[in-house]
Image: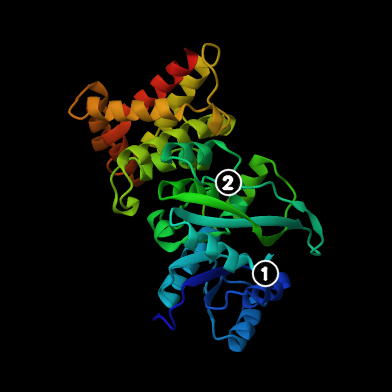
Amino acid sequence: MTAVAQHAIAIAVPVHNGGRFLDQALGSLRAQTRGDIGIFVLDDASTDGSFAIVERHAAADSRIACQRAGERLGMIEAWRRAARLAFETFQPEYFAWHSDHDWSSPGWLETLHATLQANPDVVLAHARTELVDLEGTRTGTAPPAIDTTGLSTPDRLARAVFSEMGAGNAVYGLFRRSALEACGIMRDEILPDRLLVAEVNLHGSVAYVERAERFRRGTFTSLDQNAIVSRQMRNLFRDGYERRRPYTSHTTCFLRHLAQPAPECGNVGRDARMLLAMLYYERSLSKFKQALVAEFETLGPEAPDPAVDFVRRGLRRAYADRDARPAPPSTHRDVDVERLTRTVEQLRRELKDEQDERSLALSRAERRYSDLDEGYRLIRCLGAVGRAALAVRDRWRSARTR
């Protein structure tokens, strides 16, 4: 597909059986006061006539392009593909997703765009979210979501990891396209919105813009973590897809993708990437402890791949240390980021040329698991930074007991 027109801002609307509320969602986008936008709608194999509604809007508004998937992609791939098609079609500098069942106030996009233009260090600006029921009646206001403006990189990362950030609202903000692409757009994991909003802080700040307003329609009621993940396993991935050990995969995601040099990381330094990977690992190890243990109950004493083994060792240490040491921090305010950052820098110098037993073991493990794609990526990552990462955790915990 070739670009039909260049727009500074592109919006992608992934749709799956969203016909009931789709007119309102697309109507709110067409009514934005910032008119120079491109809207790409990707229908994810809907069966309720959604695509006919999309085609009607596209026929009435030249800013709308659309495409229908022949078979269901699942939410993650639909979001990724819709974003890439919007990039290709409109060549934007800024980008946002929009839900097929929510709507936004007329000044939503213009206000967020003005925030990004006025603050070059901000890479994601997101709005106040008003909660509504299925009939559109207001039921409350979502708590203010994450804001990391004015913070140093370590403080940004700590707040993004340990705060209750409201990622499900922040992810519907306006991104700088360059930062979003540097994050791989969206990763194939449960809770992908939380991963993305945390990771984008590697590239700049996230701004909460209260005067911008969007309306989120409540389409489910359970806030139980297991219920949320069960629902995501049905919705995020294509039909028939089965993800083994989703909590283990989520917990080690940044270790596998960020703690080693990679083109997708852009110019972000290794220390910052490693810091985010270890902070997120610590947070997940604490938050998902029971779920991780449950995933291991079906396994034998020897883990079948390095990702599982790495988390298993962390859980063993967590249980062994629970009476002697404090639990991992629950909020970013509990993290001594200055001390942790100094530790990372010191370890980087100390371990530059060091070869110890762990590195040799990892080298052997790399050869052993070279036929397992996910395990191979993790082992390559840990082979480069595993010694430093584990030492960061141990020194961090030790420092918190003093």
In this image, 109 relative to 320: left or right? right
Q: Is residue 45 visible?
A: yes
Task: Report crowding for label 2: few under 14, some 14 to 19, many 20 or more residues within 10 A (C-alpha).
Answer: many
Residue 91 position within the rendered picture, expressed as x and y whole percent measured from the top left = 41, 74
Q: Quadrant of residue 74?
A: bottom right
Label drawn at residue 146: 2
Look at the picture and state if 309 lies above or below 178: above
Up the image or down, 277 lies above or below 203; here it is above
Residue beneath the point at 58% across and 59% down:
172
In the rendered structure, which disc, 1 or 2, sits on the residue that comes first in sequence? 1
Residue 220 spot, x, y in % from top left: 73, 53
Residue 294 seen in render: no
Gap between marks 1 and 2 measured at Cα: 28 Å
Q: Quadrant of residue 68?
A: bottom right
Give the residue at x 27% y 32%. Answer: 365
Report crowding for label 1: few under 14, some 14 to 19, many 20 or more residues within 10 A (C-alpha): many
SS for dot 1? loop
> Which type of secondary structure does the marked residue at label 2 adopt?
loop
The x, y position of residue 285, in whole percent, is 51, 31
Q: Quadrant of residue 3?
A: bottom left
Q: Nearer the viewer, residue 29 or 236?
A: 29
Q: Is residue 334 above or below residue 254?
A: above
Q: Is residue 84 left or right of residue 58?
A: left
Count of all numbered marks drawn on residues in the image: 2
Location of the N terminus by quadrant is bottom left
In the rendered structure, are the residues bearing label 1 and label 2 in contact, judged by CB atoms less than 8 Å apart?
Answer: no
Of circles 1 and 2, which is in front? 2
At a point 33% along the width and 37% down the height, the residue shown is: 271
Q: Nearer the viewer, residue 157 or 265?
A: 157
Q: Amino acid at mark 2?
A: Ile
> Residue reaching furthest front?
118
Q: Which residue is mark 1?
A: 18
